[in-house]
Image (cartoon, coloured by chain):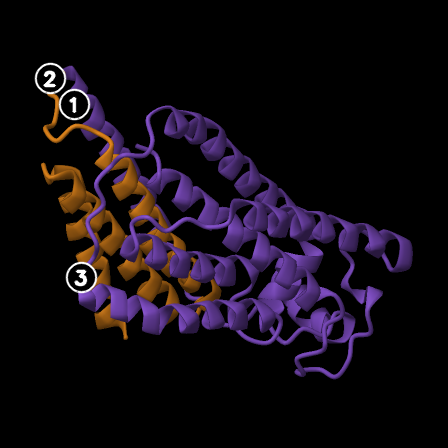
Amino acid sequence: MTALVILLGSGMIVAAFAAIYLKNLIAAVVAAGIVSLFASVVYLILAAPDVAMTEAAIGAGLSTAIFIYAIKHTREEEVEND
Amino acid sequence: MIKRSISLLVVLGFVLIFWKMLTNWLPMTDLHGVAKEYVSREPDELGAVNVVTAIVVTYRGLDTLGEVSVLFLAATGVALLLRRRGKKIGAGKRKRPSSEFLQTGTALLTPFIIMFGVYIFINGHLSAGGGFQGGAVVASAMLFLLLTFPGYKFKHTVLNWIESISGASYVIVGILGILLAGGFLDNRILPLGEYGKILSAGAIPVIYIFIGLKVGTELAGILENLKHEH
């Protein structure tokens, strides 16, 4: 069980970095959704099914959709401003 | 350069804090303090099998009401910001039908997803989950419909009525708690019933049905507003 948690945790860290560094915003949002999805499995392993359900439905499902709808209304290319 | 070194220092500070926390950490073998009090008192007092639900709906009911209000404000804000702009431009956009797979899958799965969401919030006092989780699952079924059928529109009046009525009923049930039982959102206004049966734990299932309907319709409304904003 510990090995699974470590695997999921490392997956979360990789996905989180991907969400920050990916240039394609849709891909970044999907990576952020993967962080939530793995987090919900970790919650389940840590015996918190209520939190796991919320995280899976809202974190991985609905907020990803809301972000994608929002990004659809922005411009394609990233604007450099520093 | 200075920006970089400052952020590096902040990260190092966090590493130090978490290192201290982790090295002194021991897994808990039994419950202490408030947790112990809740777990030992709850079955006799409120009669809900899922202790988390009893805490969320009754002992900490006011916090849940606060969360519902925050969600309501968020949904209202989204509607207020987006609907006006949608009206100005709106319509006339070419809509591409989605693939056969998506359409068939949605038609097959949507009723079951909605049923599962309703199951989650009706059984909130018996198994894991509750109003928020069930409502979110129902809303994800609505998301499925919106994704598959681009022109799909919910009946706004129906959604708004369900949302308003369940929100108001939730507060009314809470006030009935003051009048008939021990205080605001006390679940003992209805008989506690047999421990572990679907009709038990007093008003908790009733409150969770209202929360589930409210959260589901609100999230569906947010998604629809975002979807149809062009």
Q: What element carries label 3?
A: loop
Residue located 39% across and 53% down the image: A58
| Cβ atoms at labels 1 and 2 below 8 Å apart | yes
**Residue flagged by tag 3: what amino acid is it?**
Ser
Kindly identify which residue carries mark 3: B99
Question: Mark 1 and mark 3: span between their CA atoms?
Answer: 51 Å
Q: How crowded is mark 3: few (under 14 residues within 10 Å), some or many (20 or more)?
A: few
- Quarter of the rendering containing residue B199: bottom right
Q: Residues within 10 Å of mark 2 (few under 14, many from 20)?
A: few
Q: Residue furthest front?
A: B92
Image location (x, y in percent) of residue B203: 74, 65
Kindly identify which residue carries mark 2: B1
Kindly identify which residue carries mark 1: B5
Image location (x, y in percent) of residue B64: 62, 50
Q: Residues within 10 Å of mark 1 (few under 14, many from 20)?
A: few
Subunit under mark 2:
B
- Quarter of the rendering containing residue A46: bottom left
In front: B52, or B113?
B113
- Which colour is chain A painted? orange
Subunit under mark 3:
B
* 1 vs 3, front mark: 3
In front: A1, or B9?
A1
Image quarter where the N terminus of chain B lies is top left
**Residue flagged by tag 1: what amino acid is it?**
Ser
- Which colour is chain B painted? purple
Badges 1 and 3, same chain = yes
